[in-house]
Image (tube, grey):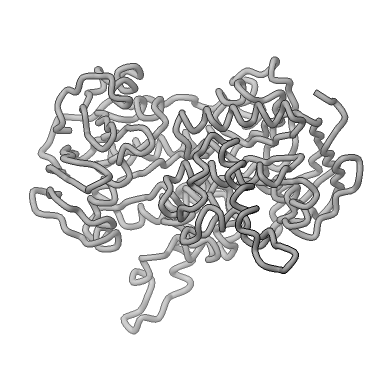
């Protein structure tokens, strides 16, 4: 690996509304180096990456790229200079094809000025093949692809641009293991070709697989650099937090069994899942585990009828539950917190206050429908304090928050409905260990208070630590329901990949 720096960041500082996101950050990246950047949510990782990618301008400091000053007017110039970024939350136009998303705003044109579809198809197909994807995907609308494939397509787009520097922000948080393996193989090929990679991740095991070095940010300050051979999980956690963090929290188990609060009986949705049945009691945490594409999220969305059911029924306290969507479900005490907070949950350009109070304006409005802004402010501030959400001000857009704090906003809004049943879809995806531990404790506290929790998670250690029972799905079928004592990592994984024997489909 060539040790000469490709990228140098010298004294980079950035503030938002009086809150300092970065404080004099300096680090360098060699050619062909894979450097992981870690830190708790709100540490400044994404802000730093956006500065390198030309999305934000630093208030202070200097960037140098390939030995020359890097002063960017915007993302387009960054791409022209060889910097490509892929964000944690996929950003694309779902109605357009993969090919159209590849070249939007940067189309290849013939001398006549007409679009050169043949050249664009060839270029996109080559990038997709390099990513291990079928070139035939280029003709399909993005909305038809799984969320994991969408992410791989966007990474392929970054590769197509022949960047010298590729920035990946939590790239595997929505990928299956097979998709993750494709990504790691591609990163190794890029590294061998001299491409540098900045890799943001909270999944420590990934760092040991692909990174050459690790930089740690804490509260906007660059606090540590380590060669990967010197890194341990304990060192990373200590550097990230500046304190001891409770790494694992284990639930002691539910109390005496009660009558089911929620019952799902023979639920079907063609192409997603079939004949799914389980029940959930007050104060219980039921884990719903499966690999990407197993149908878990679709089951949750059919319970609240965000997706239509084709067969089967759902009972709430023994009575048919047909809410017709999330809003009516919330009014009846069943709250769904979705996986894709950027597309299904939050309103990115609206304020933190507006996002917290969305759906509850009647509580802070007069009988004439006039919103009591002070009441709305109190409602939002109470939730910020209760869930320890780090904000610079309630009037700032929710998109200004880190991923973990955005997730807390989504949770806080759901809890304002005082749920009896709480459905959590990947509640800790892409967030740091400290925030994850806080959310784990919150889930357990809610269960102790009698809330029935349906927990959908791809984080198996999280599932085994929190759940009283684990229901496992494989290719649309609920193959088994395991009690805490039966739910070992090996047993659950075997069922999830279709190798284990089910213990009954009634959860």
Residue at the spot 36% in from the left edge and 81% down from the top edge: 369
Q: Is residue 383 left or right of residue 237?
A: left
Nearest to the observer: residue 102 or residue 230: 102
Image quarter where the N terminus lies is: top right
Q: Is residue 340 left or right of residue 421?
A: right
Nearest to the observer: residue 112 or residue 251: 112
Give the percent coordinates (x, y) of residue 246: 49, 26
Give the percent coordinates (x, y) of residue 94: 47, 58
| Residue 234 visible (yes or no) | yes
Give the percent coordinates (x, y) of residue 210: 63, 24
Vertical comparison of 41 with 366: above or below: above
Residue 218, quarter of picture: top right
Nearest to the observer: residue 260 or residue 103: 103
Which residue reaches farthest bottom?
A: 368
Which residue reaches farthest right?
A: 68
Q: How many marks?
A: 0
Vertical comparison of 119 with 192: above or below: below
| Residue 315 visible (yes or no) | no
Nearest to the observer: residue 310 or residue 335: 310
Residue at the spot 23% in from the left edge and 50% down from the top edge: 303
Residue at the spot 34% in from the left edge and 84% down from the top edge: 368
Image quarter where the C terminus lies is: top left
Residue at the spot 54% in from the left edge and 41% down from the top edge: 152
Residue 299, quarter of picture: top left
Residue 240, quarter of picture: top right
Give the percent coordinates (x, y) of residue 342: 49, 54
């Amino acid at each position: 690996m060539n040790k000469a720096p490709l990228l140098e960041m010298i004294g980079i500082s950035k503030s938002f509304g009086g809150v300092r996101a970065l404080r004099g950050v300096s680090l360098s990246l060699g050619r062909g180096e894979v450097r992981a950047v870690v830190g708790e949510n709100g540490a400044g990782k994404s802000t730093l990456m956006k500065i390198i990618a030309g999305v934000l301008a630093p208030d202070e400091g200097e960037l140098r790229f390939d030995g020359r000053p890097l002063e960017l007017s915007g993302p387009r110039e960054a791409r022209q200079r060889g910097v490509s970024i892929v964000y944690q939350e996929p950003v694309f136009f779902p109605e357009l094809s993969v090919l159209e998303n590849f070249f939007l705003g940067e189309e290849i044109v013939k001398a006549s000025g007409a679009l050169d579809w043949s050249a664009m198809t060839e270029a996109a197909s080559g990038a997709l093949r390099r990513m291990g994807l079928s070139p035939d995907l280029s003709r399909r609308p993005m909305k038809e692809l799984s969320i994991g494939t969408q992410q791989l397509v966007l990474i392929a787009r970054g590769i197509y641009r022949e960047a010298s520097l590729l920035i990946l922000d939590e790239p595997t948080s929505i990928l299956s293991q097979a998709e993750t393996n494709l990504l790691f193989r591609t990163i190794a090929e890029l590294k061998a070709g001299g491409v540098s990679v900045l890799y943001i991740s909270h999944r420590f095991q990934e760092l040991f697989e692909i990174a050459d070095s690790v930089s740690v940010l804490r509260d906007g300050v660059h606090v540590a650099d380590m060669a990967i051979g010197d890194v341990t999980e304990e060192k990373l956690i200590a550097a990230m937090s500046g304190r001891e963090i409770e790494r694992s929290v284990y639930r002691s188990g539910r109390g005496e069994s009660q009558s089911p609060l929620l019952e799902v009986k023979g639920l079907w949705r063609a192409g997603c899942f079939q004949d799914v049945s389980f029940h959930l009691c007050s104060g219980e945490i039921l884990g719903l585990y499966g690999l990407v594409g197993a149908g878990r999220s679709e089951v949750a969305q059919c319970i609240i009828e965000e997706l239509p059911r084709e067969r089967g029924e759902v009972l709430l306290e023994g009575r048919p539950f047909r809410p017709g969507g999330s809003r009516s479900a919330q009014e009846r005490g069943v709250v769904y917190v979705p996986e894709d907070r950027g597309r299904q949950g939050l309103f990115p350009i609206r304020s933190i206050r507006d996002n917290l109070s969305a759906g509850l304006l009647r509580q802070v409005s007069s009988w004439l429908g006039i919103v009591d802004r002070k009441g709305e402010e109190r409602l939002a501030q109470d939730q910020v304090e209760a869930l320890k959400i780090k904000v610079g001000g309630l009037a700032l857009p929710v998109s200004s928050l880190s991923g973990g704090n955005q997730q807390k906003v989504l949770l806080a809004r759901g809890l304002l409905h005082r749920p009896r049943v709480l459905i959590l879809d990947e509640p800790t995806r892409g967030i740091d260990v400290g925030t994850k531990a806080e959310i784990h404790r919150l889930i357990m506290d809610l269960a102790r208070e009698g809330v029935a929790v349906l927990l959908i998670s791809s984080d198996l250690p999280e599932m085994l630590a929190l759940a009283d029972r684990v229901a496992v799905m494989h290719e649309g079928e609920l193959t088994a329901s395991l009690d805490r004592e039966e739910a070992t990592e090996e047993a659950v994984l075997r069922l999830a990949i279709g190798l284990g024997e089910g213990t009954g489909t009634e959860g």
